[in-house]
Image: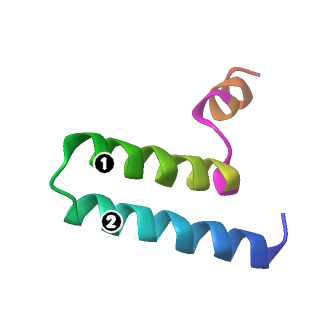
Amino acid sequence: MLDDDAAYFERRAETQIELASKSTDTRAVQAHYALANFYLERIYGTSEEGKAANDA
């Protein structure tokens, strides 16, 4: 992954977390955290990928 891509995804994740913290609607909070997780997975991979690497 290019550094520019990682920086973009990190900014998007931070924005979603900030929006979640400001939201008063439970469904909106969940949606913002889901989007933040998506962006973080783009940078770091999924927990399933990490688990598979640790099991190898």
Label 1: few (<14), some (14–19) or many (≥20) C-alpha neighbours in 10 Å? some
Which secondary structure dominates the residues rendered in magenta?
A: helix
Figure quadrant of the C terminus: top right
Mark number displayed over residue 19: 2
User: Which of pointers 1 and 2 lies earlier in the amino acid sequence?
Assistant: 2
Closest to the observer, 29 or 37: 29
Closest to the observer, 15 or 40: 15
Figure label count: 2
Residue 51 position by quadrant? top right
Task: Tell me whether circle 1 and circle 2 mark residues in contact (CB < 8 Å).
Answer: yes
Residue 30 magenta-highlighted? no
> Residue 3: percent from the left, percent from the top?
78, 76
Mark number displayed over residue 16: none
- The residue that label 1 is drawn on is 28
As measured in the structure, the alpha-carbon distance from the residue carrying label 1 to the one carrying label 2 is 9 Å
Picture residue at 21% right of the left edge, 66% below the top: 22
Residue 46 magenta-highlighted? yes
User: Does residue 2 sit above or below 48 in this rendering?
Assistant: below
What amino acid type should be assigned to the residue bearing mark 1?
Ala
- Give the magenta part as a residue range: 43-48
